[in-house]
Image: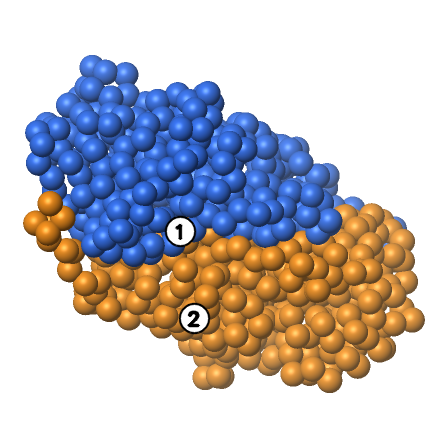
Chain colours: A blue, B orange
Amino acid sequence: MNDRVPVPPARAARVRDTTINLTHGSGGRAMRDLIEDVFVSTFDNPALAALEDQAVFPLVSLAAHGDRLAFTTDSYVVDPLFFPGGDIGTLAAAGTVNDLAVCGATPLFLSCGVVLEEGLPVDTLRRVAASMQRVARAAGVAIVTGDTKVVERGSADKLFINTAGIGVVRAGLSISARHARAGDVVLVNGYLGDHGAAILVARQQLALEADLQSDCRPLNGLVAAMLDACPDIHCLRDATRGGVATVLNEFAQASGVAIRIREVDVPLREAVKGACEILGLDPLYLANEGILVAIVPPEDAARVLAAMRAHPDGRQAAAIGEVEPGPAGLVVLHTGFGGQRVVDMLVGEQLPRIC
Amino acid sequence: MNDRVPVPPARAARVRDTTINLTHGSGGRAMRDLIEDVFVSTFDNPALAALEDQAVFPLVSLAAHGDRLAFTTDSYVVDPLFFPGGDIGTLAAAGTVNDLAVCGATPLFLSCGVVLEEGLPVDTLRRVAASMQRVARAAGVAIVTGDTKVVERGSADKLFINTAGIGVVRAGLSISARHARAGDVVLVNGYLGDHGAAILVARQQLALEADLQSDCRPLNGLVAAMLDACPDIHCLRDATRGGVATVLNEFAQASGVAIRIREVDVPLREAVKGACEILGLDPLYLANEGILVAIVPPEDAARVLAAMRAHPDGRQAAAIGEVEPGPAGLVVLHTGFGGQRVVDMLVGEQLPRIC
């Protein structure tokens, strides 16, 4: 009786809708077409093209990169979706790459889970996916698995992205927030606060003549150069929400040491400094998306700093302070005026939905 | 001058707020306290307690489980958060465990990224985290890394969760949607549609006397028993959004075969059948969260079926059809009345936010 059964129509090659609707999250044909059209074609790799619900890789291919697996995740809810220097897609790729890089891992694979609000223009999703792929390619990672959900209009704000990441840690490294020792030197790789300031500009909460751009970028190349110069980096973390102040507090608490930094040595653009003064914000708490804090043994500090300055993502690197034996958990800033003040963890909320 | 610097106050042991506010997503102290109080204490494992931004594991510990790494992700936006038989937390843990299990992987690690709406009761989050941990423990996986974002009231609907998962595939397996062969037998492990029907009841779109419960559960134990019985399982997939019909279509398309199923052999509760008749829904498209479809060689079918029925999550397992050489991509249902109809992929949206 087979001849009486009609053959199903050929698959659509491309999504025809211009906006997202609930069928795009149904699990059925419309979702499959959206995924193939927007994600599979953009993220272009065999693992994703197989359209299985998981990506699979030989363990031996991982072992070539080191001896430990690193696994991390971040959700991205930045408002607005597009801002000077980046968008939610560049953030979603770079942010998770950076969380892998700062534990000494070579980032290899990303996942991409999106929650879409009904009514989102499909072209917005295309632009964001293209941004993710651009960053992923620059960082040498592949976006290998994903998921798409759609919620009714008003149940989410346009587009949220979650990325999880897998990397492999180089053998012999021992980077941890607990490893800061008295005498160690505190390094940063460039200007603080550009991302936070760029978001303020994008929200029109700040009218600046200056061309402020987010520093959003993958840092795995920079970290690799730093580790080549000094495999004995003690602490390393990217300073996103909560800024450099929060990372320093985390290091001081986890290591049971004090950290002393010098305001005069903290790299800061004049435009960001001015914006902070006008708005009463502290640049040490401003979010960054391309800034890391490293704590290194004093004998290696000059070599690491030189390696950072020789890398495109570390041209403005600086030594901003030192680790002291105690009081445990304390971070102190020496101000330009010769005074000092405690730099506590961020207590309130500086800027919601910064990333 | 150290003695003049005040020591920061001791950390709060527990979140005092009863509802989520924007500071819980700030990256600062309130977020850290929420994470420690709700997630670290509930998910209880050393990787998470270290409060690093990533979890790290020796590759050799993975190699004990097989030879390939599996990586998957899903976001969960189910409405309502709590429903008969489960909640968004049980879904978020079981769903990702199942995506790993059905490629033959032993699930090992989960991530947990939450997007919280300002105003969400903290106790809701505690309940959901406890559900995740209960399922994770039952499945033998650890929730090892996470992320917390908060958006303003009205920018998300209460709580979304993303989980990504890592597992290791047993050596020697070759499960793929492309591996169905003419003559293979189609198996399911139990009643279809319980999850979809339970969500309808929870939304009060369906007033049923019957005690309908979601089938939400981790299936890795069942899959392990099936693979012990037959390492040569050809296709395996959990039938979530889009239901069993969608999975069968995916298999038929990917393998270039036809699949013929018999309505009379499809396990279906009377209550679900009745609900579908009243609402005009097709149970083959109803979402499941504890149902898988397996395609196995004919000579192994009886052995796999027996192994399924011997497992608590496969008591109602049944052989529901066979694979035929063609027409490629076609799925046909033989109805109870002796007719047949094409079972196409889901074209519209049956029930939004089912998972």
Residue A237: image location, x then y, percent: 39, 43
Mark 1 is on which residue type? His
SS at badge 2: loop
Q: Which chain is home to disc 1?
A: A
SS at badge 1: helix
Closer-to-camera residue (B202/A78): A78
Which label was assigned to residue B44? 2
The nearer-to-camera label among 2 and 1 is 1
Give the side of residue A206 with respect to residue A318, left or right: left
Q: Residue at x 36, y 70 (%)?
A: B41
The crowding category of the residue bearing disc 2, from other C-alpha atoms within 10 Å (few below 14, some 14 to 19, many at least 20), is some
Q: Which chain is home to disc 2?
A: B
Closer-to-camera residue (B64/B26): B64
Residue to which mark 1 is pinned:
A179
* Screen quadrant of the N terminus of chain B: top left
Give the side of residue B15 with respect to residue A77, left or right: left
The crowding category of the residue bearing disc 1, from other C-alpha atoms within 10 Å (few below 14, some 14 to 19, many at least 20), is many
